[in-house]
Image: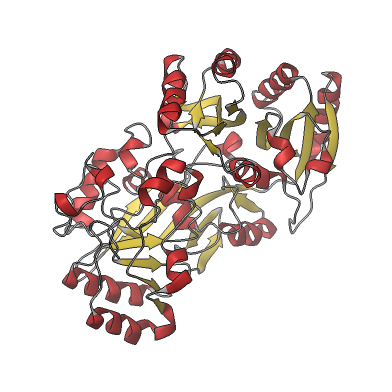
Amino acid sequence: MSTPGFVPLSATFIAALSDLLGADNVITSGKNLTTLSQDFYWYSPVLRERIGDRYAAAAAKVSSLDQLKQIVSLAVKERVPLTVRGGATGNYGQCVPLFGGLVLDLTGMDKIIDLSDGVVTAEPGARLGIIENQARPLGWELRCYPSTWIKSTIAGFVGGGSGGIGSIAHGGLRTPGTIKQFKILTIEEEPRILTLDEAETMRVFHAYGTNGIIVEMQLRLAPARPWQQMVVSSADWDGLLNFADELAHDLDVPKRLLSVIEDPLPAYFKPIKKFYPEGHHVIFLEVDEASADAVAARAEAAGLEVPHRIPYHFPRKAPMLSDYTWNHTTLWALKADPAYTYLQCGYGENFREQVKTLQARFPGEMFFHFEFTRGNSKMGLEDNIVCGGVPVVKFSTEERLKEMIDACHEIGVFVANPHTCIIEEGGRDLGYDIQLELKAEADPHNLLNPGKMKQAPLPEFATPGSMPKFLYS
């Protein structure tokens, strides 16, 4: 490897890993190593340019806490940088190693330890889809989950995500009470387990695995409901937005999903575009079955169409409308046109006016996709129903992308920048200091995912001349 700052691994280190895990679980070259060194950072053309050439020297497939402790001890002794990986469905390069070293694939630590009393206790690699499917027959469901729920792991979601399907009812992961407990492993020659409860868990939440390795966690669940999926569509953009806004704020209608997607984006959803008329904007809904008929009648009374409904069924199977919402909307657009990328926005109560301003300023460059949620932690709003979204934008240059972000800021639209892999550059400061304090305790040699936490000291091998240029430019 010739990338700046790349840390190779010694033959003795690789041999020790192979003895511990078995040679088949230590990957040192080839396509598998490339895959295990990447996530979905390529949604961003900026990140493709900055970190597309970054790979680990090796990847280790870990299946137990005992194995993990031994690997950490070896890594500390040799000052090997460690990057933790789950399902790798993140979009900001959270698990792309900037300095080589070792990627720890924790998807083998996937036990659901307990599922009772509205709480799931699981190892870090437990899949959210499996948790949901095991919880539902017991009368529970995830409070929120990403559109990548089939592949995403529980620790990966809290380490790099923020919200998703269900957030309109329960808020995001940062909402107090959702995350109950973390147990994290320190990066020391004799690793320790630290337990963080309730509000303390924010010291690790969305920290990209930079200040401790989550080895066990507890999430609170919600009572399960029979969710019916529904498409509402119209060529009338304003009428559709009005209906969506009113329904979002109607707390008497239980909802798990309310996504609004502007034409032409729905035309890119090839497996489901037969469900709605060509040229229509769409709303994808999940509403409680008991309210579904009334919601459909309400939409039709507003002059909108209800071209498709999917009654509740379990186990759930495709088509799932939620698989085309949140950042999966961007994925389908990218499949149609690689020039697309996205922003992450939080709008005000005047979101219609804000959108009209942006549409007028960037015609043919910005297409809107809204997600209504309860609260927006990035904006400091916890109880309101708010309009956020993931607009799909045409990328031409990084300068033009910055113009779009600046234009949003000028009219009061908050942007969590998805075109950086640095934690502090992605959103507002809602706990970086306490995360930095924990890093000093849990990762004293600064070996965990170095370069991603801007305030943290870089490890001794990261001299200014060897660092990726974007870290100090």
Q: Is residue 311 left or right of residue 15?
A: right
What x and y, as percent, mark residue 171? 53, 36
Q: Quadrant of residue 244?
A: top right
Q: Is residue 398 above or below residue 11?
A: above
Q: Is residue 359 above or below residue 469?
A: above
Q: Is residue 108 visible?
A: no
Of 94 and 394, the residue lying toward us: 394
What x and y, as percent, mark residue 151? 57, 59
Q: Quadrant of residue 69?
A: bottom left
- Give the quarter of the figure containing the C terminus: top left
What x and y, as percent, mark residue 59? 38, 71
Coloured how? Answer: secondary structure
Q: Is residue 343 left or right of residue 213?
A: right
Residue at the location (29% across, 74% down)? 71
Q: Is residue 178 visible?
A: yes
Q: Is residue 134 above or below residue 73?
A: above
What x and y, as percent, mark residue 463? 14, 53
So how many labels did they put on this image?
Answer: 0
Q: Quadrant of residue 96?
A: bottom left
- Give the quarter of the figure containing the N terminus: bottom left
Of 21 and 254, the residue lying toward us: 21
Of 287 and 341, the residue lying toward us: 341
Residue at the location (31% across, 33% down)? 429
Q: Is residue 290 left or right of residue 201?
A: right
Q: Is residue 303 left or right of residue 287?
A: right
